[in-house]
Amino acid sequence: MFVNGWQINWSSMVENTIQYGVKIGLLVILLAILAPIGKKVISTALTKSTSKQKISEARLQTLEKLLHNAFSYTLMFLFIMMVFAIFEIPIGPLLASAGVVGLAIGFGAQGLVSDVVTGFFILLEKQIDVGDYVTAAGFNGIVEEVGLRTTQIRSFDGTLNFIPNRNISGVSNHSRGSMQALVDIGIDYGDDVDKAMTVLQEVCDEFQADERFVEGPDVIGVQAFGTSEIVLRIIGRTENMEQWGAERDIRKQIKHAFDQQGIEIPYPHQVYIQKDT
């Protein structure tokens, strides 16, 4: 059959299309089988190797996610190369020209290079691990993934933040070692400070056996003089990520204790003066 002067062999086209489709389909199936198997092998190998070296669970999760990403990128690269082979596209010239193309693209990919380099040092120096509570690039939250290009931090409102590693100029890791539970409570200027501190210490003593506390809690004394209150402070060291729950429970017990002892927690008052005319 001739179309615009070109001879078209429809049977050959259909045959080639079917052959290419079958080969690509088999390649996709193979990729779908290898991906979960490879990730499973990586996870198993990491678990066995790290169990002997006593690596923390957080560090294990960090390495596992990183290796899974690297494995996925490798599979994708091999898939593209095999697709080129199926269509009989010569790979040699493409690889030879990759240096020239890479040089041209490199000037516009400085950010990507910076991401990879920064991510490498974050992992090498163990600045953060999966599951850590951190502050980085203006975001607070729990680290869900540390990669060579981006770091994922889940904020406490549920937002997942994808942060390019080059934007992480400094990291505050709140999950290394024990944390500090800090409770400031105000009492009225007319109340007995010593009595209030005794009541607060009794409340603290109730939490001495609490497993969340590593040390304390204890009353350290008068922290500040406010406009309408005397501020007393309680401090205790807690297990990682347990400080907020411990603070809430201490405040609740303080309210019950102050109510029983007649100690007033100041609150804003409004005074209305009516002038008779």
Image (cartoon, rainbow, N blue to C red):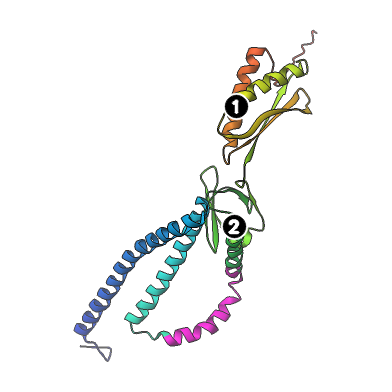
Where is 45 relative to 96, above or below?
A: above
Query: Which residue is painted at 38% across and 64% down in the image?
Result: 38
Labelled disc at residue 126:
2
Q: Main secondary structure of the magenta part?
A: helix
| Image quadrant in which you'd find residue 275 | top right
Residue type at mark 2: give it: Lys
Q: How many marks?
A: 2
What amino acid type should be assigned to the residue bearing mark 1?
Answer: Phe
100 within the magenta span: yes
**Residue 78 vertical placement versus 152 (above, below):** below
For label 1, count other residues whose C-alpha is less than 10 Å away and answer few (under 14), some (14-19) or many (20+).
some
Residue at the image point whose x is 59% and y is 57% from the top: 126
> Toward the viewer: 10 or 71?
71
**4 displayed left or right of 107:** left
- Image coordinates of residue 234 in percent, x first then y, are 69, 29
- Residue 117 x/y as whole percent: 60, 67
Q: Which residue is mark 1?
A: 207
- Real-space Cα separation, disc 2 to disc 1, in angstroms: 34 Å
Label located before the other in sequence (2 or 1): 2
Q: Is residue 269 visible?
A: no
- Tell me if 115 is positioned left or right of 25 in this view: right
Outermost residue to the front: 52
Mark 2 is surrounded, within 10 Å at the Cα level, by few (under 14), some (14 to 19) or many (20 or more) other residues, namely: few
Residue at 65%, 31% in the rendered image: 216
- The disc label shown at residue 229, or none: none
Magenta-drawn segment: 92-113
Q: Is residue 117 magenta?
A: no
